[in-house]
Image: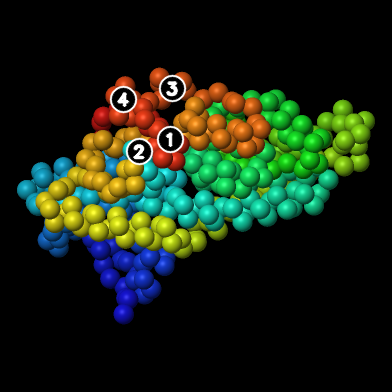
Amino acid sequence: MWKSTSVLGYRVDLREPPHHRADAVTGTPSRRWRGIATPSRRRSYGSTRRVNGVGRPKFDSHSGACKIDAEMSRRGKKCVVCCVPKTIDNDVPLIDNSFGFTSAVEAAIPMIEAANTEAEACPNGIGIVKLMGRHSGFIALHATLASGDVDLCLVPESSFEIEGIMSHLEAKLRENNHALVVVAEGAGQAQMGASVKYDQSGNALNEDVGLWLKSMITNHFAHERYDSDEDFAGKKAKCFLVDPTYAIRAVPANAYDQVYCSSLAHAAVHGAMAGYTRFLVGNINTRLAMLPLDLVVNRRNIVAIRDRMWTRLLFSTGQPPFDAVVTSDDECDAEGLYRSETATGGCTVSFGDEY
């Protein structure tokens, strides 16, 4: 019988099996590392497992786990600190993919199909689907490839110009009488002139790129020059915005992620019982591995727009090959370890060694 219990001083509702839940089991912001360490000492827990997402570099879960490990060592307490890569954005470096990523991509496909249907039903209709991805556009990338109907995909790692986007969409409207756009929530922040803001958990607060993109496209095709254009006269372009963020977050894990989650849990326990600490569990080249946290702390997996996965997307959408936000030399670590692409088409960006 599942029931409510307390983990590290925080109330956890276990009235149903955790693997059927779509949200995080514990709601402990990574910046509250000292508060997590305190009940561990008071209740004499033998191990602490950090399960959380990756947020602001200064306060991400990996650096928070390192702080817990350092704090427990300072207090002279024995404690195992292990990280499980639970973030659907897939922005944990080096591993094949993070838990929840494939479920998010799978849940995004029906939303893209719905937007495409709506766009097809309207002359010169343009469907816009905004997907999750504050810093890494893997969900948008893989959902676009899986769909095959998307005409334009925008991710945070790729810069773009409004003129190039509008020219591409205009060509698609003239060719197909409709268009479909997928955009990651972190894309276009520089184009919008957005200022950097964070919530209390250290997560970036982005401006709404979906509303901004819809406004820009609507205003562009409302120009009077299209009044005398035979492809647009009497049927000006109309935008539809779909934002399925919370609908996707609420879906239970798919079969792959349920198996993967169990494997991660087993690996975490085996590592703890073997005496390891300060490590991350995850698949590398399809094999479960234990990585020292120092290899992943303050680093992020981002879409490598010079990788073959992104090239496949360009062939699928036909969109222009926009430039990277930063050059490859600037975005990747000097060590060769961080230059190799991950299985999902990513490379690693570093924020320095301080945590």
Q: Secondary structure at mark 2?
A: loop
Q: Which numbered disc, 4 or 2, marks the residue closer to the eye?
A: 4
- The three-letter amino acid code for the residue at tag 3 is Ser
- The three-letter amino acid code for the residue at tag 2 is Pro
Q: Secondary structure at mark 3?
A: helix
For label 4, count other residues whose C-alpha is less than 10 Å away and answer few (under 14), some (14-19) or many (20+). few
Residue found at x 73% / y 41%: 179
Instruction: Please report whichever mark, 1 or 2, sits nearer to the chain's N-terminal start.
Output: 2
Pick whichever, 296 or 245, lies toward us. 296
Q: Quadrant of the C terminus?
A: top left
Residue tagged by mark 3? 328
Q: Which mark is on residue 93?
A: 2
User: Is residue 195 visible to us here?
Assistant: no
Q: Secondary structure at mark 1?
A: strand
Instruction: Please report whichever mark, 1 or 4, sits nearer to the chain's N-terminal start.
Output: 4
Distance from the alpha carbon under mark 4 to that under mark 3: 13 Å
Residue found at x 81% / y 41%: 177
Instruction: Please report whichever mark, 4 or 2, sits nearer to the chain's N-terminal start.
Output: 2
Residue 151 percent location from the top left of the image = 67, 39
Pick whichever, 122 or 14, lies toward us. 122
Residue tagged by mark 1? 346
Distance from the alpha carbon under mark 1 to that under mark 2: 8 Å
Label 1 with label 2: CB-CB less than 8 Å: yes
